[in-house]
């Protein structure tokens, strides 16, 4: 944690919806005139697409059918931790982009499935924002969780997460349902051992729960809409959270536990604005006073 160089991390599985949460943060940053450095978690994958395919084949041949980006070996997590540490200390660091598709290839000028070169963060940023798989990791000698000042988990119930991943990978990446199912199965041990434990480290979790039948996610024709969902928002430390104010501002919300509020899915953006804006401004005010 750092007063002068704060860090926010948003952590969630593939298909969880972390990109949508990032969009909300970007709105807040623009409105409040906050300059952020950004890290996309995919930037710290160890292998590009072709290398990962080869590595998975080698691991399968050796008897390991569960090698995945969710685990430690498929990522540069020590380097990510070092980047967090450098930013917290000096406000500097570097990142790159993983090019997912042809749209991004046109934007960055590199083929899909490859990385852009490493580049330093912009000068004089107000904070660092991370969005990816491992922003609150604490396992096997890696501890990315100790540096962020605010850690947020995006955790749809598992069937909804799978539906979102299947639809995304089919529509934007051209994968078949069977290929996505194979990926889900391959990642499951790492999901259990490395993704889920992070959500005990996060300060706030947003968990979307559908109110329609998602019992077989592999045949679902549509992703449940926000209005067909509720969102459980859990605070690890509810001290300072003005729950009566949130209940008055978010119609249809209610408390399910002393540290949890449940809201209609369509009110998620409003809830995030109400909850996160004061937290971000507090970080910036602390930074200003320390400087």
Image: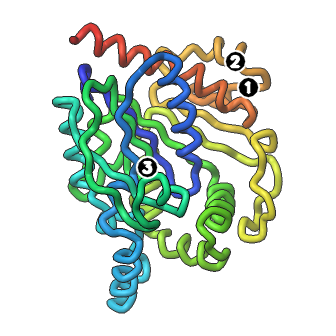
Using residue 90 as the reference point, say whether residue 146 is left or right of it: right
Whether residues under marks 2 and 1 lie with C-beta atoms below 8 angstroms apart, the answer is yes
Q: Secondary structure at mark 1?
A: loop
Q: 10 Å neighbourhood of mark 1: few (<14), some, or many (≥20)? A: some
Q: Residue at x 44, y 21 (%)?
A: 280
Q: Residue at x 34, y 76 (%)?
A: 51
Whether residues under marks 2 and 3 lie with C-beta atoms below 8 angstroms apart, the answer is no
| Residue receiving disc 3 | 132
Q: CA distance from mark 1 to mark 3?
A: 28 Å
- Where on the picture, by quarter, is residue 232? top right
Q: Earlier in the sequence, mark 2 or mark 3?
A: 3
Residue 284, position as x, y percentages in the image:
36, 16
Residue 144, position as x, y percentages in the image:
29, 45
Q: 10 Å neighbourhood of mark 3: few (<14), some, or many (≥20)? A: many
Whether residues under marks 1 and 3 lie with C-beta atoms below 8 angstroms apart, the answer is no
Q: Which mark is residue 151?
A: none
Using residue 217 as the reference point, say whether residue 180 is left or right of it: left
Q: Which mark is residue 253?
A: 1
């Amino acid at each position: 944690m750092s007063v002068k160089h704060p860090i926010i991390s948003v952590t969630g599985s593939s298909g969880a919806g972390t990109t949508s949460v990032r969009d909300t943060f970007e709105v807040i940053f623009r409105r409040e005139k906050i300059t952020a450095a950004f890290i996309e978690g995919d930037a710290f994958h160890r292998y590009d697409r072709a290398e990962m395919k080869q590595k998975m084949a080698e691991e399968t041949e050796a008897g390991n059918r569960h090698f995945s980006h969710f685990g430690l070996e498929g990522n540069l997590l020590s380097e990510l931790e070092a980047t967090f540490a450098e930013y917290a200390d000096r406000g500097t660091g570097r990142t790159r982009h993983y090019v997912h598709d042809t749209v991004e290839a046109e934007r960055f000028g590199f083929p899909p499935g490859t990385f852009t070169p490493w580049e330093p963060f912009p000068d004089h940023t107000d904070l660092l924002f991370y969005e990816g798989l491992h922003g609150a990791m604490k396992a096997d000698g890696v501890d990315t969780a100790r540096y962020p000042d605010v850690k947020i988990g995006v955790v749809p119930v598992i069937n909804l997460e799978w539906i979102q991943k299947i639809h995304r990978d089919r529509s934007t990446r051209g994968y078949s349902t069977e290929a996505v199912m194979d990926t889900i199965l391959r990642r499951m041990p790492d999901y259990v051992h490395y993704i889920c434990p992070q959500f005990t480290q996060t300060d706030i979790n947003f968990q979307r729960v559908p109110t329609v039948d998602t019992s077989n996610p592999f045949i679902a024709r549509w992703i449940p809409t926000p209005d067909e969902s509720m969102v459980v928002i859990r605070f690890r430390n509810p001290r300072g959270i003005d729950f009566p104010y949130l209940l008055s501002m978010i119609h249809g919300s209610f408390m399910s536990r002393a540290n949890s509020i449940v809201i209609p899915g369509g009110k998620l953006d409003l809830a995030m604005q109400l909850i996160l804006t004061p937290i971000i401004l507090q970080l910036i005010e602390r930074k200003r006073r320390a400087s």
